[in-house]
Image (cartoon, rainbow, N blue to C red):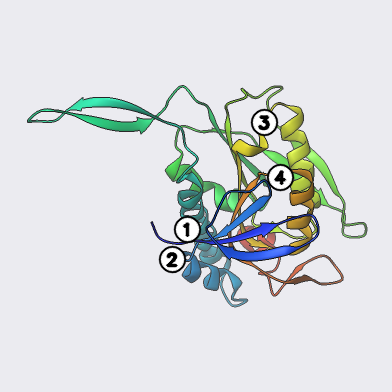
């Protein structure tokens, strides 16, 4: 299996290492896939027009979801009849529910790519807007179910994990409805240490898949170098 970069976040330190032993702390995978690197470069470029930026988001959603699904989707063993004989086979277990939760607006940019790989997943929209003065999120739309089946695999799509406000609010909503953090995956494009540190402290065992990790935020809470406002760039606003 191809090696993937693993960042482990503990409550007091940030450690970079290769894919090693599982520990009860946040794990952040940065897959070294050339297509992920290519579309990240397209998305970062300030000269990329909105229509191409949307394509980049779709492709990043597709390939990051592919990586996230690798050891996450439930399977079951069965047998199939080939034209010549019967043989053992592994299929996705249809009895285990899968849900995708895009954080609006920007999470919709990654949703299309994710759905190409998870076509039968339920989609629950969660709308969060950040107050630019306080940097705190407020919810304007919540289509989450009252209760998740405890076995549900939940995939969250949100291009930017910056201050951590929106993703922490999302995790709080999900867990109070029965979602298991250990069965939850977050797909984002750019992550920053403040958000990852908060997730690590609150939800050890959670796993994040991101195209890159940037080192800092500016005074307005935007990731630097980042890729700007992913929602505005996706929808041309």
Vertical order, 64 against 73 (above or below):
below
Count of all numbered marks drawn on residues in the image: 4
N-terminal of the pair, mark 1 or mark 4, is 1
Q: Residue at x 79, y 55 (%)?
A: 11
- Residue 165: where, in percent of width, then height? 81, 51
**Which of the two marks, 3 or 4, is nearer to us in this view?**
4
In the picture, residue 172 is in which quadrant?
top right
Q: Earlier in the sequence, mark 2 or mark 4?
A: 2
Residue at 68%, 25% (x, y): give it: 145
Q: Is residue 212 visible?
A: yes
Of the 4 image quadrants, the one containing the C terminus is bottom right
Q: Position of residue 138 (x, y in %)?
A: 84, 44
Which numbered disc flags the more N-terminal residue, 2 or 3? Answer: 2
Return the residue at label 2. Answer: 35
- Residue underneath mark 3: 179
* Sooner in the amino-acid sequence: mark 3 or mark 1: 1
Residue 111 location (% of width, % of height): 55, 47
Name the secondary structure under disc 3: loop
**Mark 3 to mark 4 CA distance (whole Å):** 14 Å
Contact (CB < 8 A) between labels 2 and 1?
yes
Identify residue for label 1. 59
Query: Which numbered disc, 2 or 1, marks the residue that appears first in the sequence?
Result: 2
Disc 2 and disc 1: Cα gap in Å?
8 Å
């Amino acid at each position: 299996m191809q090696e993937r970069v693993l960042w482990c976040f503990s409550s007091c330190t940030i450690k970079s290492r290769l894919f090693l032993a599982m520990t009860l702390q946040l794990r952040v995978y940065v897959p070294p896939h050339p297509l992920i690197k290519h579309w990240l470069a397209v998305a970062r470029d300030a000269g990329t027009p909105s229509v191409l930026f949307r394509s980049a988001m779709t492709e990043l959603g597709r390939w990051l979801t592919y990586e996230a699904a690798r050891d996450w989707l439930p399977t079951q063993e069965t047998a199939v009849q080939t034209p010549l004989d019967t043989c053992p086979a592994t299929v996705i277990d249809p009895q285990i529910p899968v849900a995708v939760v895009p954080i609006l607006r920007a999470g919709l940019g990654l949703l299309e790519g994710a759905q190409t790989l998870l076509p039968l997943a339920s989609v629950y929209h969660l709308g969060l807007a950040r107050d630019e003065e306080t940097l705190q999120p407020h919810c304007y739309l919540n289509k989450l179910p009252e209760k998740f089946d405890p076995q549900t695999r939940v995939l969250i799509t949100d291009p930017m994990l910056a201050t951590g406000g929106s993703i922490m609010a999302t995790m709080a909503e999900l867990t109070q409805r029965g979602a298991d953090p250990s069965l939850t995956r977050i797909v984002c494009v750019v992550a920053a240490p403040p958000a990852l540190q908060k997730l690590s402290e609150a939800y050890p065992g959670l796993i994040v898949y991101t195209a890159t990790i940037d080192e800092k935020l500016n005074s307005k809470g935007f990731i630097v170098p980042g890729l700007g406002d992913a929602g505005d760039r996706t929808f041309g606003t």
